[in-house]
Image (spheres, rainbow, N blue to C red):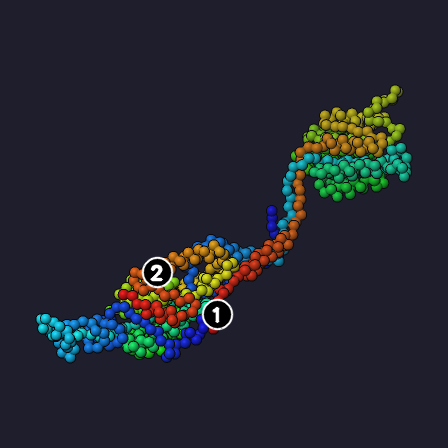
Amino acid sequence: MALALSTPAVLWLAPLALLPLIVRLHAPQPYPSLAWLGGDPLSTALEVGLRLAGALAILALLLGIGGLHLAGQTTRQIGNGAHIVLVIDRSSSMDDSFAGSRPTAEQASKSAEARRFLRSFVSNGEHDMFGVAIFSTAPLQALPLTSHREAVLAAVDAIDRPGLSETDIARGIAMALSMHDDDPSAASRAIVLVSDGAGVIDRRVQEKLRAAFRKRPINLYWVFLRTANTRGIFEPPGAGERDVPQVAPERHLHRFFESLKIPYRAFEAERPDSIGDAVAEIARLERHPIAYVERTPAKNLSRLAYAIAALALALLVAARLAEVRITAERVP
Amino acid sequence: MADLASLQSGPLRDLPYRVAWRARGVHAGAHRGTSSGAGGLFRDLATLLEAPDPRRLDLRASLRDPFEQLYVRRFERSTAITIYALIDVSASMGFVGNMRKLEVAAAICAALSFSARRIGDRFGVIGCDREIVPELHLPAARARAGAVVAALRTFRPTRRGAGGLVDAAAQIAGRRKLVLLISDFQIAADELAAVFEALAAHDTVPIQLIDSAEAASLPRFGLLPLADLETGRRRLVVLRPSLHAAWQRERAEHEALLASLAARYARPPFRIVDRLDWDRLAAHLMEARG
């Protein structure tokens, strides 16, 4: 709770609030002797109460004029979710449909389908923090880890812009890892890799990734958007084909991920719906207690101050109206 | 409403009074005295040796005496008494509700002055708050009290306390006098007792001025900001039936105290509520008690 004033200078007038305590509130009527009165607690309480109401009214008016507000603040809370970096393939093949052709009215592009499901994924992750990295030949940090939902959605929206060039998964993953490194919190972490292909990862790069993954536990999910008539990640190579990364990069990437000894799951999506299933499964798995920071915006309390002042003034007016005179036919 | 006419005390307003005790003193007056003299009420017979006044020789009584002594009639000399009006002019007497208390007191003084002068009694006024107020001090005399009555009418009471009444009692010590103690008797209990004790030697008639606006005719509910005339203390009072009842109890207690003090040292108090009923006051003053 941090109360603040837009115009703190009004506090110079705060001593005015002492006025009701000093000046008399009523025009007193002469009375022979108040000795009868003794101590009447109700009367005393009301007298004190009215004076305080006067002081309160002045203070509240001053605070109202001064623009009392509750300063914006951040509170830490515990929710369910994870810090998730979406690593999205922006290679030109993502602009094709699952059938491997130009997108048509019936068949949207893979990136558009991915966008659709990722949007719902982002929208549903209430306490998740998302970062977005996109990669083709070179990775690009679209958005660092953040809890600003609109920004994340905007970044996700951008993935169906026309892509370019090749697929370099290793650098995308490395970027995601570095984005996680920038985030010091103890939340559960995940990388969701969305791609429609893979490339050969250099052995040295593999070692680096292995070392990076060893540093911290990160869950890895790979949503592989499999275009029709291409190799799946689970399929062993056919007879007469050599089982080398150059021939079946997806399969070998999958094996590389499995060899990392981290929680890893791969989803092979051949239809748009399977992306939804995969994403739903990821959302289900990534529900860990997470400390998240909630921002509360500044709240204007002027109205409240005016309301309090009005109440206090109403009390004073009521007291004034309830005032009676000693009823006497005055002697001239 | 106190009609002003009732307070007008022209030369016509007469306030008769009577005392049941025998006045001491040498001045001839209208009351029974202790000294015997030539005129007035027959008192007794005395031998000529005891009362050597052969002009009052009672032949019939002398002849009836087998021892042949000569008897003389003795008569009570009617004697003048001294009347004092002791007026409390402390601040509480300045309250103006349904009457002006000092106006009433002044009217009583004027009437008493007139009556006393007519029958040869001496009349004095002492106005007191915490001490005797010099401009309201008229030592007893057979003069008219017009000046002091006028001063009383215009007096603005401001000071508190009733200590002056005790001083005044000391001033008028001596022969028994008729003393009208005019006050609202809103005096602290110990001070009140001191006043009555100091006046014990005299024939004291407490006259209590009560303004119904002070209590009886207050509204049942409401906020009443009050300022104590005596102390200047300000209070906001939440009027309500329970508070009225409490006040009533307090007042009744005070009245009871006043009544018990009066029973011990003085005549029963005469209450003037809002307006002065001259006939009742006269009846009260005539209803002398030893």
> Relative to A61, does residue B42 appear above or below in the rendering?
below
For label 2, the SS is helix
| Residue A112 location (% of width, % of height) | 84, 38
Q: Looking at numbered disc 1 in the image, what kind of residue is underneath it?
A: Arg
Out of A318 and A103, give the one closest to the viewer: A318
- Dot 2 and dot 1 within a common chain: no
Q: Chain of mark 2?
A: B
Residue located at (43% from left, 67% from top): B274
Rendering quarter of residue B125: bottom left
Residue located at (35% from left, 71% from top): B282
Q: From where the camera sits, is residue A102 visible? A: yes
Q: Residue furthest left?
A: B67
Residue located at (72% from left, 42% from top): A148
Residue A78 lies left or right of residue B92; in this view the side is right
> Relative to B85, does residue A99 appear above or below in the rendering?
above
Q: Looking at numbered disc 2 in the image, what kind of residue is underneath it?
A: Ala
Q: Nearer the viewer, mark 2 or mark 1?
A: 2
| Residue B259 location (% of width, % of height) | 35, 60
| Residue A189 location (% of width, % of height) | 70, 33
For label 1, the SS is loop
Residue B5 lies left or right of residue B16; in this view the side is right
Q: Give the CA distance from mark 2 to mark 1.
A: 30 Å
Q: Chain of mark 1?
A: A
Residue located at (44% from left, 55% from top): B246
| Residue A166 location (% of width, % of height) | 84, 35
The answer to whether the residues at label 2 and label 1 have Cβ atoms under 8 Å apart is no
Q: Which mark is residue A330?
A: 1
Q: Residue furthest top?
A: A239
Identify residue for label 2: B259
